[in-house]
Image (cartoon, rainbow, N blue to C red):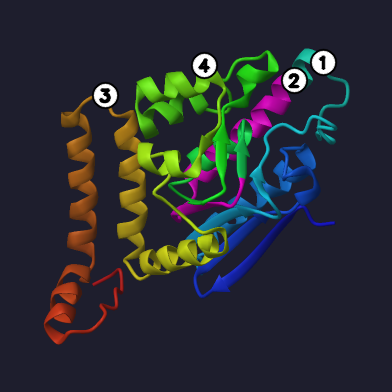
Amino acid sequence: MTFVVVDHPRPGIALVTLNRPERMNAMAFDVMIPFRDALEEISNDNSVRAVVVTGAGRGFCSGADQRSAGPLPHVDGLTPPTVALRAMEMLDNVVLSLRRMHQPVISAVNGAAIGGGLCLALASDIRIAAEDAYFRAAGINNGLTASELGLSYLLPRAIGSSRAFEIMLSGRDVHAEEAERIGLVSRCVPGEDVLDECFDLAERMSRFSRPGLELTKRTLWSGLDAASLEAHIQQEGLGQLLVRLLTDNFEEATTARKDKREPQFRDRR
């Protein structure tokens, strides 16, 4: 069985599906390694302009696989502490691969996003949830910390510190309606509509300039890390100048508005 399925439901859009529904797409290594590899391959596929990630069945991703973690490669001869470090490094790289993708990434959260599944959703650029989806920072419920795979970094930046502290320290479920209200997701829609909603958004974004999209994504993420407005505003300005001076996109957008047509961005002069 293929645990990660890549489809192209519309031109320029890649749909990546975690495909182990009987385990609610838990994060076993035989799921996460091909998922990471698929993300890296898609990132370098210049025919793909936007990416949608979802889960098969009734769950988005249920976090750690509590039955079997699956095989981890390249650990022969290592002691358990080092194996554990390699395992964490591999899972960390999945989160980082989502963030590093050239294309915008939309998570279509079709059901439960628990523990590491919440982390995967937060590592994407945009989240749209089905009405029956829910989120849980589950580590605290399992006698561990709720801090894993970047969650204590990503969640406060998405919803603010007080809400992040409360959700991570209580281990309670956050249902889709609340997730929309607090900004954890952009919106929630009926379950049967969640993929089409994501495809429509991806299609809209894919009409824009490639460097415009890539640089906007980069500056949004780097803005979350910026030490000061002064440091970040210069980076934004340099990106804007790059696209303005090296392409005729601005002139094309102006002409297209006058002609009442969709612009065709060439991304060059």
Give the class, few, some or many, for how many residues have Cα within 10 Å of label 2's Cα (few <14, many ≥20): some
Looking at the picture, which amino acid does disc 2 mark?
Ala
Q: Name the residue under label 2.
A: 84
Q: Mark 4 points at which residue?
A: 169
Alpha-carbon distance for marks 1 and 4? 29 Å
Q: Quadrant of the N terminus?
A: bottom right
Badge 1 marks a residue whose secondary structure is helix
Alpha-carbon distance for marks 3 and 1? 38 Å
| Pick the front one: 147 or 252 | 147
- Marks 3/1 in contact by CB < 8 Å: the verdict is no
Please tell me whether residue 95 belongs to the stretch shown in magenta.
yes
Give me the disc on residue 80: 1
Judge depth for marks 1 and 4 and give the one in front: 4
- Marks 1/2 in contact by CB < 8 Å: the verdict is yes
Residue 100 shown left or right of residue 268 in the figure: right
Q: Where is residue 63 in the image (x, y as percent from the top left)?
A: 67, 34
Q: What stretch is highlighted in magenta?
A: 84-111
Q: Earlier in the sequence, mark 3 or mark 2?
A: 2
Residue 161 shown left or right of residue 254 in the figure: right
Badge 4 marks a residue whose secondary structure is helix
Q: Which of marks 1 and 4 is nearer the N terminus?
A: 1
Judge depth for marks 3 and 4 and give the one in front: 4
Judge depth for marks 2 and 4 and give the one in front: 4
Looking at the picture, which amino acid does disc 1 mark?
Pro
Q: Where is residue 29 in the image (x, y as percent from the top left)?
A: 76, 38
Give the class, few, some or many, for how many residues have Cα within 10 Å of label 4's Cα (few <14, many ≥20): some
Badge 3 marks a residue whose secondary structure is loop
Q: Mark 3 points at which residue?
A: 227
Alpha-carbon distance for marks 3 and 4? 27 Å
